[in-house]
Structure formats: C-alpha cells, structure tokens
C-alpha cells in the first residue's frame, strides 16, 4: 500500500527526514511523480537537442609508451573543449568496477532504518553522510536521487566508519584511481606552461571523497531530474556509471558546432571511467579548461547507480588563477578564494548550472 501523502510536508518527512529516500517512495508502490519532484519546464530533460558523444575513450596505458605525446594531447584537448572524456586501461581492475556497482545496490537495498544510521548528526563520522536529492531544504523541486557520501581521511577511519556493504571496494577504488588522478592533473597543469611545486599539486588534490548515487526508476522521466545541472566544484571527478545511461553534458557556444544539439550524452562504455574537470581547475587555469555543466536524466525501467570519486583541494588551499599565468596573460579572470569558502557556498545553494563559479568572480 502506498502511503498517503496528504501534504507536501508529509512527503518531505517520509523521504528526507525518515530515511526512506526516493527509493522508499518507489518501494511504497507509488506510480506517479509527486508534485514536489516536478521540475519547472525549463529544467526538464528532453531528448531532442541531444546527441551521443561518440568518441573513443582515451587509452591511459599509452601514457607510458611511444604514444605518450598523442595521449597527452587528447587529454588536454578534451579538457579545453568539452571538459569531459572517458578513459580505459586506467589501472582499476574491471572486477573491482563490477563489485562497486553491486555494493552500491547492496547499500541502497538496506532498510530505511539501517541507512539512516548514516544521517548527519547520528553518523559515526562527520565525513560519512547518507542523504537524498542535493540540498532538499533549498530546492523548489527535489532531485530524484539518493546517495551515500564517504569522505576520506585515512584507511583506518574508512574501514571503521564507512558502511560495511561498500567500504572495502570504495577504499580500493579511491586508492587505485589516485595514480591516474595525479597523472591527469599534472598533465593539465604542465600544459599551461607554468612551473608548479610538488607541494602545490599535493594541495590541489589533497582531499578525496567517494560517493555512491542511486537513481531509482522513475514513473515519468520527462518531469524529473536525477541531478540538476551543475558543474563539479573540485579539481577533477572520476565517475563510474552502470550501463543504463542518462548523463548529459552541456555544449557551450564555443564548442557547439552540432547545430541544434545542446546536450551530449556521455554513453556508458563497458570498463571505461568518465573524467570531468571541476571548477577548481577552471579557476587555476584562468578559464582555459572547461568545468562543464552536466545533469542526469532518470529512467522508467531500471534503477541506475553511479560512483564518483571527487578530488578536491585541501580546504585551506587558496584557489585562484596561477600567478605565472596571470602575468603572462595580463588578466586574472577569477579572484583568489579559500577552497573551504568555495565549498561552503556550493553546498549552501541548490544546483544551478554554472552559478557556483560566480563566487570566484
Ligand atoms: C555528480 C554527478 C553524474 C552521474 O555526482 O556530481 O554529476 O552520472 N553525477 O551520476
Ligand atoms: Ni557532477
């Protein structure tokens, strides 16, 4: 029997406060999208004006071989144009990618009571958080998504405080992706033609977090969003998506030569990982690299999972266009901000496209 939500408040309490999440709504037998989830016309994700991003993934194993320069150019080019690319031979075993998706399903299949043990305030660690939507108290229309967020401090804390259903695989994923992350960030920064100290790189990639996103099947994907349009605030994001699809990247005026196409779908490629550039790299590069706006469409047939590793600067790191670059270019397109402040501003607002970047203007 579907619970009767007479008021928007009772629905909000059920989903947001009582640990049921969107998954609880669907499990309760709900067959229509509740009012609270209906997006305004301009935010709905239509399939017209979209196209698959059909380019081959970048083979990272070739970074250490004769094709080094070619691979490097591919990475730089993708970061300058779309801000998104896919990689294979990334050093993460394919079995681990499968286990990650399985473990995400295991976690979200727990009861609402078990999942709510990771609510802020009761979670055994402030770095571990189960939630729904993005900023529910700020959003007019909620996002059709539940998540668990696991901030990394050290291995001991991860194994102690992250959920049993996924802690080992999530930790392996985070650690095994770190070589690739460093390679990519170093390549991007070196390509700017400025010298950056090793310790600065450490600061720029100094904070890491693994999320598991769960997008329950949705009775009407035309009315909802899984994630509303946003750019990621950090340095780079490594994303594992399952085979369902629905991730769209916005083309800006400069790279839009597909005529009527506004959004490109980043198609699932078995064994590949999606890499995208965050606001931090955009700011450091004085605007050269793109932190593309993206969003997720829901699906009516199956639940989708995705598992991002977010790489952020250390909270105390000062983020601004690299000094040498500003000297060369004669203009600073962003002001310097402390990453902690940038992050606080990001989380204080609902997802709203590229508005997050205005904080550094
Ligand atoms: C995110 C995000 C995309 C996806 O979590 O920031 O953009 O495919 N996720 O789930
Ligand atoms: Ni994102």
Image (cartoon, rainbow, N blue to C red):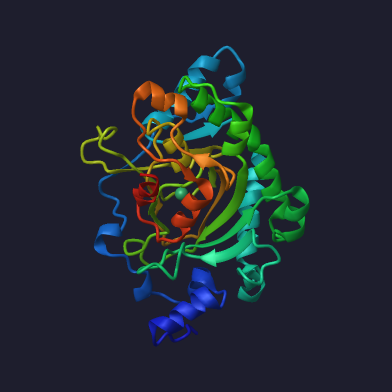
| As drawn, 106 above or below 20 | above
Residue furthest to the top: 66
Residue 252 in picture, x, y percent from top left = 29, 39
Residue 44 in picture, x, y percent from top left = 30, 59
Residue sitting at x 57%, y 12%: 66
Nearest the viewer among 343 and 269 is: 343
Residue sitting at x 40%, y 68%: 138
Total labels drawn: 0
- Judge from the rendering whether residue 135 lies leftward or rightward of residue 176; answer left or right: left
| As drawn, 103 above or below 115 | above
- Can residue 137 be spotted in the picture? yes
Nearest the viewer among 265 and 142 is: 142
Q: Residue 249's quadrant in the figure? A: top left
- Judge from the rendering whether residue 195 lies leftward or rightward of residue 140; answer left or right: right
Nearest the viewer among 313 and 115 is: 313
Residue sitting at x 62%, y 18%: 64
Q: Residue 270's quadrant in the figure? A: top right
Residue 7 in picture, x, y percent from top left = 39, 85
Residue sitting at x 42%, y 65%: 218
- Can residue 242 be spotted in the picture? no
Quarter of the figure that contains the C terminus = top left
Residue 199 in picture, x, y percent from top left = 63, 31
- Judge from the rendering whether residue 107 lies leftward or rightward of residue 43; answer left or right: right
């Amino acid at each position: 029997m579907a619970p009767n939500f007479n008021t928007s408040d009772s629905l909000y309490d059920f989903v947001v406060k009582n640990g049921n999440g969107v998954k609880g709504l669907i499990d309760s037998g709900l067959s229509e999208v509740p009012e609270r989830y209906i997006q305004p016309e301009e935010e709905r994700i239509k399939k017209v004006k979209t196209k698959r991003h059909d380019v081959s993934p970048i083979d990272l194993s070739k970074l250490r071989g004769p094709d080094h320069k070619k691979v490097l150019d591919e990475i730089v080019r993708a970061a300058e144009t779309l801000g998104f690319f896919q990689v294979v031979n990334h050093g993460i075993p394919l079995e681990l990618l499968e286990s990650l998706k399985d473990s995400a399903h295991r976690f979200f299949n727990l009861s609402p009571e078990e999942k709510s043990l990771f609510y802020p305030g009761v979670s055994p660690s402030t770095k571990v958080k189960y939630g729904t939507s993005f900023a529910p108290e700020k959003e007019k229309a909620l996002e059709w998504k539940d998540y668990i967020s696991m901030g990394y401090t050290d291995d001991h804390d991860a194994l102690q405080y992250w959920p049993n259903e996924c802690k080992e695989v999530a930790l392996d994923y985070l650690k095994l992706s770190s070589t690739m992350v460093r390679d990519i960030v170093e390549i991007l920064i070196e390509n700017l033609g400025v010298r950056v100290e090793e310790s600065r790189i450490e600061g720029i990639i100094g904070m890491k977090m693994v999320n598991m996103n769960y997008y329950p099947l949705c009775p009407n994907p035309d009315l909802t969003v899984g994630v509303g349009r946003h750019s990621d605030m950090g340095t780079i994001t490594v994303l594992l998506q399952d085979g369902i699809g629905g991730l769209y990247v916005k083309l800006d005026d400069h790279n839009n030569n597909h005529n009527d196409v506004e959004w490109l779908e980043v198609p699932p490629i078995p064994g590949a990982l999606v890499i995208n550039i965050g606001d931090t790299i955009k700011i450091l590069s004085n605007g050269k690299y793109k932190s593309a706006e993206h969003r997720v469409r829901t699906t009516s047939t199956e639940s989708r999972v995705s598992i991002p590793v977010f790489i952020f600067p250390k909270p105390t790191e000062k983020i601004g266009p690299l000094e040498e670059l500003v000297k060369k270019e004669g203009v600073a397109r962003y002001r310097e901000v402390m990453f902690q402040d940038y992050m606080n501003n990001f989380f204080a607002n609902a997802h709203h496209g590229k508005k997050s970047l205005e904080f550094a203007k």
